[in-house]
Image (cartoon, rainbow, N blue to C red):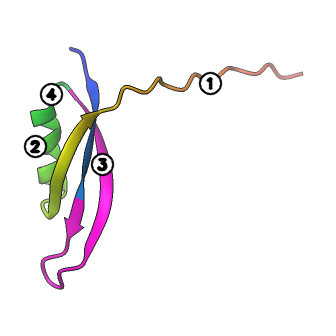
């Protein structure tokens, strides 16, 4: 199972007052469709405008010795 980090760009839209906020949500999933399903389940009022794959290198944290 290979998971990819998907970046979902869009807007949170509150139905009761129309307030909108731009945001980017990220999900580690096998497919973009899985990421969209998860996003819609967790944030039903988030309107997805675009999806990208995050190809950045993960940060490597080095262990420091205690002296």
Q: Residue 51 placed where, x, y %?
A: 21, 41
Question: Where 42 sits versus 54, above or below?
Answer: below
Report helix, strand or loop for mark 1.
loop
Write down the residue under mark 2: 37
Magenta region includes residue 49: no
Up-down: is 9 above or below 51? below
**Labels 3 and 4 touching (C-beta < 8 A):** no
* Residue picked out by circle 1: 61
Q: Are marks 2 and 3 in contact (CB under 8 Å)?
A: no
Q: Which residue is mark 3?
A: 25
Q: x and y percent of residue 50 in the render?
A: 19, 46
Q: Which residue shows up at 18% across the image and 85% down it?
A: 17
> Helix or strand or loop: what does disc 3 sit on?
strand
Going by the picture, which residue comes out furthest to the top? 1
Residue at image coords 37%, 25%? 55
Q: CA distance from mark 3 to mark 1?
A: 24 Å
Q: CA distance from mark 1 to mark 2?
A: 32 Å
- Mark 3 touches mark 1? (CB < 8 Å): no
> Which class describes the residues within 10 Å of circle 4: few (<14), some (14-19), or many (20+)?
some
Rendering quarter of residue 34: top left
Tell me the mark number nearer the camera, choosing from 2 and 3.
3
């Amino acid at each position: 199972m290979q998971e990819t980090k998907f970046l979902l760009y869009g807007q949170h839209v509150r139905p009761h007052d129309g307030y909108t906020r731009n945001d980017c949500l990220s999900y580690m999933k096998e497919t973009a469709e899985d990421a969209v399903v998860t996003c819609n389940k967790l944030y039903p009022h988030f309107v997805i405008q675009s999806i990208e794959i995050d190809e950045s290198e993960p940060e490597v944290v080095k262990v420091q010795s205690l002296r």
